[in-house]
Image: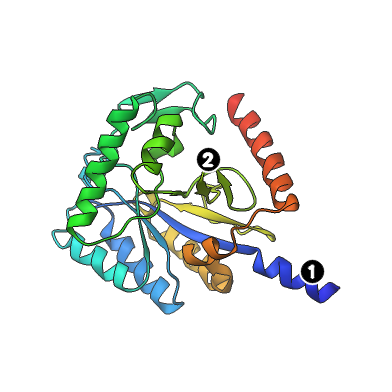
Amino acid sequence: MLNSIKKITTKNTGLLIRMDDIAENMNWHLMDKCELLFDKYQIKPLLGVIPKNRDPELLKFNKNNEFWKRVMGWKNKGWEITMHGCNHLYTQKSDKNDIFNYGGNSEFYGLNYHTQLEKIKIGLEVFKKREVKIRSFFAPNHIYDANTLAALKNSGIKIIIDGYGLFPYYRDEILFVPQLFYKEIFLPFGIQSTQIHINYWNDDYFKNFEIFINRNYKKIINLDYIISIARPNLLKNLANFCVEKVLKTVRFFR
């Protein structure tokens, strides 16, 4: 009995490394250090690549003219290349009416369906030209509306690396991989993704991240593993329901 519980717990515990704001202009010094660290432990992170970056904050970083060659190198290592918005420009704003009650600036929220669909198709075309197949997505600042989800589904993307819960879950034919924390936190039970913004880091922060990886590398998983075990059951549904209600309430009154 105890062995069965331990087996189930181990199978349903893990952390997906999600890296945000991967673009031609970024902190390449720390990206190179992260790549060496991931290679050391054979970690396959998920990289949120901005296909047509126009974010003025990111454009302050030096440009790597070999960016797409690097993307292909990561892809060939088995790293997951995901689409992180289209141009990462915040032209919209949500008053916490988005699907996660997150609120704040957005690239997509409030735009009509056809406009959102066109943005997603433009981004996908950039990857297609480089022969990079995209199956997952996450929006800048975690903000989506019903049109975003419809546009993604009709573009062939049915995995979103975002959401509330202790376990991945399906909703409206989309697989959501929860992303709960803004820093590296490993829960004793459940499967989530962590949000990493190396463009806000310094070398000291990287050292802390390196310590975290050294301690937890055996528990770090990839997207393929998540897809293989993402089967709903009563316990998972109940846990996700409770976490979602609590976090949505907290965010609404924040």
Q: Residue at x 30, y 68 (%)?
A: 74
Amino acid at the residue labelled 2: Asp
Identify the mark nearer the N-term, 2 or 1.
Answer: 1
Q: Which quadrant: the N terminus?
A: bottom right
Where residue 173 sits: x, y (%)? 51, 45
- The reply to whether residue 254 is visible in this rendering is no
Q: Is residue 188 left or right of residue 34?
A: right
Residue 122 found in image quarter: top left
Amino acid at the residue labelled 1: Ile
* Measured Cα–Cα span from mark 2 to mark 1: 31 Å
Nearer to us of marks 2 and 1 is 2
Q: Residue at x 61, y 32 (%)?
A: 248
- The reply to whether residue 60 is visible in this rendering is yes
Q: Secondary structure at mark 2?
A: loop
List the single residue furthest toward the top. 95
**Dot 1, how many residues are within 10 Å of its Cα: few (below 14), some (14-19), or many (20+)?**
few
Q: Which quadrant: the C terminus?
A: top right
Q: Residue at x 51, y 24 (%)?
A: 96
Where residue 163 sits: x, y (%)? 54, 43
**Dot 2, how many residues are within 10 Å of its Cα: few (below 14), some (14-19), or many (20+)?**
few
| Above or below, comparing residue 161 to residue 172 in the picture | below
Q: Are marks 2 and 1 in contact (CB under 8 Å)?
A: no
The residue under label 1 is: 5
Q: Is residue 184 left or right of residue 24?
A: right
Where residue 184 sits: x, y (%)? 53, 56
The residue under label 2 is: 172
| Above or below, comparing residue 204 to residue 108 in the picture | below
Q: Secondary structure at mark 1?
A: helix
> Which numbered tag is attached to residue 88?
none
Of 7 and 125, the residue lying toward us: 125
